Amino acid sequence: MLYLAHTFYLPMKIFFTITIFLLILIIACSDEQNGREVTSQTEDDVANSPEKDAQIQRHNINRLRQNTDSRFSCDTLALMEFVLNHYPPGTYVVEFDKSTTYSTPKLAVIYPSKFPGYIFGVIAKSRTGDRLIETKNIVGYDQSFIDLDSTDLGTAFFYLTLFQCVNNSINVVWETPIPSHGGFNKISQKLWNHNRIDFIEINFHYGQGTGHINYNYFLIDGITSKPHLLMTYNGINFKRTIANYNGDEFPDYYEHIYYDLGDKVYSTDSVAFVWRGKDSTYINTKNLKQKRRY
């Protein structure tokens, strides 16, 4: 009799243990789901409220100010504050894509030593009438697919902007659009060796083609004039490279032609495109009817 009772007790103990475990699991999943809903609702509330967004931006700037030991005239904090105060709601100084999971991203800003007093920055603006964009939705490899998505997350318009620092105040010299809506990676200053012209290279991920796109802004007429845009790219089966085809001051490019044999992809040919100023387009040297804006 004692043996039967003991035998019955063990399955009942296991049954109650499993039941309690399942209840805890259900409650935990419910709490997690509720947490996600609250987070989602909070993000949506901020994205549809310029006032809340501005309040959060000011809070973040103040927190960064408190944690920054060294400051200088027109530094990145001052630039963030300038954009917040002088640009339409939903405008942000973009950050570099993270190089590692736990790295701290830096702002997409260049203080060129060759041009003291000037600042290059990548700015993202929200489209008027849409919900405000979030920078996490426009930076990084995964966000390069944004053109395939709906506009539920807002539409970002990127700009390369030149600022000038005068008497500790920031002014806008010019801004020019960057023809992309997502997938930003980094910005860098480079030199075209052909005629020693400086240019700003803005690199975007391009997940659809497993590669990247560079928007190259050449300072043809000096830093205070709007730059000349030339797009280059590199991927598995596409490539465009900067070239000096006709020897003038404007960069040209080679469009590489790829062949896909199923088991391999390779390029053995290319065609040159040259800049025709009177048409403000690039012209295919082998087919004059084929034109490209940049």
Image (cartoon, helix red, strand yellow):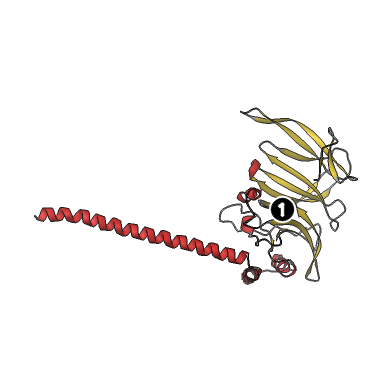
Residue with the most extreme right position: 278
| Quadrant the N terminus occupies | bottom left
Q: Is residue 33 left or right of residue 245?
A: left
Name the residue carrying label 1. Answer: 187
Residue with the most extreme left position: 1
Instruction: Locate residue 9: give its quadrant.
Output: bottom left
Residue 68: horizontal and vertical position, in percent?
A: 64, 69
Instruction: Locate residue 224: give its quadrant.
Output: bottom right
Residue found at x 66% / y 31%: 265
Residue 31: horizontal and vertical position, in percent?
A: 43, 63
Q: Is residue 263 left or right of residue 1?
A: right
Q: Is residue 291 left or right of residue 134?
A: right
Residue found at x 34% / y 57%: 22
Element on which disc 1 rests:
strand
Q: How many marks?
A: 1
Residue found at x 37% / y 58%: 25
Q: Inspect the image, locate mark 1, and give the three-letter code of the amino acid beneath it.
A: Ile
| Quadrant the C terminus occupies | top right
* 60 lies above or below 265: below
Residue 208: horizontal and vertical position, in percent?
A: 64, 43
